[in-house]
Image (spheres, rainbow, N blue to C red):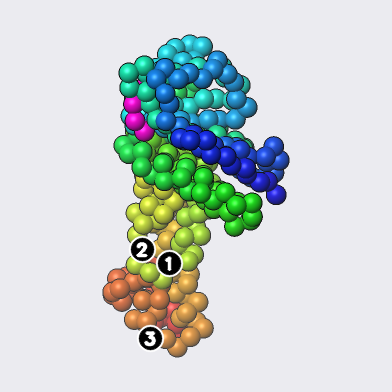
Amino acid sequence: MSHTLFYQDFNHYRCLESVEKNSHELYLCYCGKQDCPPSHEFGPATRTEFLLHVVLEGKGTFSTPDRTYVLEKNNIFLIYPNQTTYYQADADDPWTYIWVGFNGPKAETLVRYAGFTPECQTAVLPDTKPYETAIQGILTSCQLNLASELRRSEYLYSFLAQLAQDLHPTQHGDSDLSYPGSTYVRYALDYIEHHYGQHIKVSDIANYVGISRAHLTNCFNKELKLSPREYLIDYRMNKAKDLLTTTVLPINQIASSVGYEDPLSFSKAFKLVTGVSPSSYREI
């Protein structure tokens, strides 16, 4: 188990994660908050992990070997592992920022999903409050026990989930999604299995897996050679067949059990799939 150590020094808060990182897909390395004095500088320096800074107030500059960014409130900037960077607070309006360092097999995918590239390492956030709340949550969960460690992980994921939500819609279309189509189909099938008896639609399935209906349809066509709507209907009809042959439930209850509010709509769909009505199928 990894542990986190904390210290507090006036307005400078920091947590340090041990070098034992275990096998988590994403793990916390350190985080903190600092009110910088005028012209306060850091670097040139390199890190071994991904490091994000969120500017809460004030101004400053962030420099990579290729360019210098002038940043202010609501800006976020990313430092890549093994990249030499330098940043400095403004002389007249020095910035206050929070930061979080993280790594793991999924780290690079996440920052790419959010739209960061080595050519573009900054972005603008709509609101910094959720990020500040997450960092404060990590910093107050400082006890060296399992419960606190799980809370630190929860806050880290909350920070990164907010980042994906805030930046992904403005950066990418569905063609750049980070998961293969088979993954979305697998989650969609699981959702259908557990919710087919409710009045769900394809748009509900797409919302659940977090992609557009059009993209979900493309994934289904590629993986299963049929659309989500066709799969959902087939799944419901197969469940209806089982109920018709193994129970004495009336047709209207079977219709409701497989997600149809209207028994007539169910009967039409059933006949379209099987070639016979539900009552005729029961007699076969």
Q: Does residue 93 belong to the magenta stretch?
A: no
Element marked by disc 2: loop
Q: Quadrant of residue 198?
A: bottom left
Instruction: Measure the alpha-carbon separation of dots 1 and 3.
Output: 19 Å
Which kind of residue does numbered mark 1 sit on? Tyr
Q: Say above or below: 20 vs 247.
A: above
Q: Amino acid at mark 3?
A: Pro
Point 48% across, 85% down: residue: 247
Q: Is residue 17 above or below residue 193?
A: above
Cα distance between the residues tagged 1 and 2: 7 Å
Magenta range is 56-60
> Which residue is painted at 37% across and 82% down in the image?
253
Q: Nearer the viewer, mark 2 or mark 3?
A: 2
Residue at figure coordinates x 47%, y 42% from the top left: 135
Label 3 sits on residue = 250
Secondary structure at numbered mark 1: loop
Which residue is denoted by mark 2 in the rendering?
200
- Residue at position x 44%, y 58% from top? 231
